Amino acid sequence: MEQPIPPYLFAFAVGEIGCREVGPRTKVFAESVLAVLDAAAKEFAGTEDMIRVGEKLFGEYDWGRFDLLVLPPSFPYGGMENPRMVFLTPTVIKGDASGAQVVAHELAHSWTGNLITNKTNDHFWLNEGFTTYAERRIVEAVQGEDIAALNIGIGWKCLVDTMERFNDNMEFTKLLNNQEGVDPDDIYSEVPYEKGFQFLLRIERQIGRAAFDEFIKKYIAAFKFQSIDTHMFLDFLKANVPGIENDVDLKTWTEGTGIPPDAMEPVSNIYTKIVSLANEFKQGRMPSEEEVASWHGQQWELYLENLPKSVEASQVTALDCRYRLSESRDYEVKVAFLQLAIGSRCSEYYNVVEKTLKEVGRMKYLRPLYTALVQGNAGKEEEKIFAQRVFAEARETYHPIAQGVVESIFSKHL
C-alpha cells in the first residue's frame, strides 16, 4: 500500500482462512468454517452502505479496500482498525446485524485515527473520541436515531461508572492526561471514548450540526496523514470557529477531571423508557413481555447497565427464568447479566461465568467479570478462590495483554 501508517497499525494474519464477498470494497475473512463465514457475511452485509455514509460525512475513503477478518475467540479487543483489513472478535457476530456497529467504529477510524493520529497516548482521545462521534453519526444514518440514542445511553452509563473506577486517581479522567511511567493497559477506560465524544457533541450543540460537519471535513483535510496533539487540535478549532473558547470551556473539557457540568445525558423516548423500567425493577417490578417484545441486545444492555450493582438473588433468578439472559448469544447482554448475578451472590450462575471466561478472551468481558468476583473483602473468599482457579485454567488461552490485565486486577484486589 502507498499510504503511510503509524507502526501500531501494521498487522498480518496467518491461518487456514476462507472468505465471502459482501460488497465492492469488502470481503469478510475468517477460519475456513462454513458456518462462521456465512454468519459473518450475513452480519456485515451492510458494510458498503456504511462506507458510503462515512464518505458523505467525512470525505473520500482513502484506503481502497475495507476488508474484515474475524479472529479466534482469544482476540482481546472488539476490533482493531488495521487499514484495509480490520480485525474483529467473533463476539460481534450476534445474528441480528447489531455487531455491524463495531464495524462502524473501526470504519470511522479510517478518517479519525488512521488518517489523523494522536502523537502520544496522552492524547488518545483524539483517536477514540472522534471515532466514537463518527461511529454514531454513521449508525444514526444507517440504522436510525433510536439505535444511535441507545449507543449514546450505554456510553453515558459506562462513562459514569468509569468515574467511580478512577475515584482514587482522577488524573485518568482527563482527556489530556500524563501517562509517563504508566502501562496504558492498566488505565484503559471509556474516558477517551465517551468523554471525548461528549466534548465533540458539546461543540456540535454550540455551533450547530451543519457547521460542525464542515469543521470536521476541514480538520480531516488539514491534518490527514499526520500525527497531532490536543493543543494543535484546539488551535485549529479556535482558528476555524472564532469565539468558541468563550462559549465552551475548552480547558475544563480537556484538562479537567470528571464529567464537565455541560455534558449532556442522552434524551430520547427509547432511552428514557428503558431507564424508567430499570428504575422500576429496583422497586420490585419486572418488565412485561409486551414491554420488551421488540428489544434486541442493545436495549437489554442499556436496561441491565442501569440496574443496581446487586439486588435480591430471587430477583435475578426470576429475571433470567423469564428472559433467559444467561443464555443470550449476545455477550454484551450475557456479561451484563452475569455481573448482576455475581453482585447479588447468585452462585448458581457461576458455572455460566466459568464457561464464559473460558470461551472468550475479549478484555471487555474479562475485566468486569474478574473484577466483580474479586473486589471487596466481606464474604468474598469463595469467589476469589473461584476466580483464581478459572484464570489458572484459562490463562494460556488468553492473549498476553489479556493475561496482564487479569493479573493486574488480582494484584489490586487479592
Image: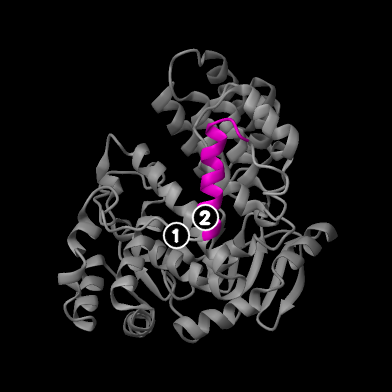
The part of the image, by quadrant, that contains residue 265 is bottom left
Asked if labels 1 and 2 touch by Cβ distance under 8 angstroms, the answer is yes
Residue 13, position as x, y percentages in the image: 63, 61
Q: Is residue 109 visible?
A: no
Q: CA distance from mark 2 to mark 1?
A: 7 Å
* Residue 267 circle label: 1
* Coordinates of residue 235 in the picture (x, y in percent): 19, 75
Q: Residue at x 72, y 72 (%)?
A: 45
Q: Amino acid at mark 1?
A: Val
Q: Residue furthest right?
A: 34
In magenta segment, residue 278: yes
Query: The residue tagged with tag 1: helix, strand or loop?
Result: loop
Tell me the chief SS of the magenta region. helix
| Amino acid type at image mark 2 | Tyr
Mark 2 surroundings: few (<14), some (14-19) or many (≥20) residues within 10 A: many
* Quarter assignment of residue 198: bottom left
Q: Residue at x 36, y 52 (%)?
A: 191
Q: Label 1 neighbourhood size at 10 Å, few (<14), some (14-19), many (20+)? A: few
Which residue lies under the disc numbered 2?
271
Magenta segment, which residues? 269-285
Q: Please tell me whether mark 2 sits on a helix, a strand or a loop.
A: helix
